[in-house]
Image (tube, rainbow, N blue to C red):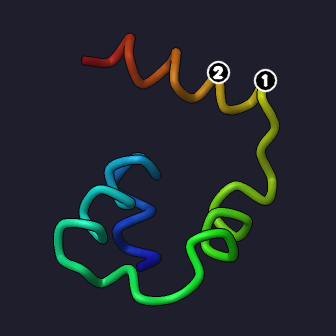
Amino acid sequence: MQILLTHLEPSKVMKFLAACKLGEGDYLQLKEKLFAEDNVDSLYEKIHAYQNIE
């Protein structure tokens, strides 16, 4: 999981887990863990930076 998060955007990790049906468990707990350090502003910055790369 850590490798995926290191190399992919969190949204792509979630899509991967959903496609592989590896997402057994509590999504809300996973979401809280993934975005614990983020707020709306930091997520906006990450999305904006990611969109400018592609």
Residue 1 location (% of width, % of height):
41, 79
Mark 2 burial class by Cα count in 10 Å: few <14, some 14-19, many 20+: few
Give the residue number, with chain letter if any, for mark 2.
Answer: 45
Q: Distance between the residues labelled 2 and 1?
A: 6 Å
Tag 2, which secondary structure? Answer: helix
Nearer-the-camera pick, 1 or 19? 19
The reply to whether callout 2 and callout 1 are in contact (CB within 8 Å) is yes
- Screen quadrant of the C terminus: top left
Nearer-the-camera pick, 38 or 52? 38
Which residue is farthest bottom? 25
State whether residue 37 is above or below residue 33: above
Which residue is found at the position 46% from the left and 52% from the top?
10
Residue 11 location (% of width, % of height):
41, 47
37 relative to 20 in the view: left or right: right
Residue 41 bears which disc, if any? 1
Q: Quadrant of residue 6?
A: bottom left
Tag 1, which secondary structure? Answer: helix
Which residue is found at the position 70% from the left and 70% from the top?
33
Query: What amino acid type is highlighted by mark number 1?
Result: Asp
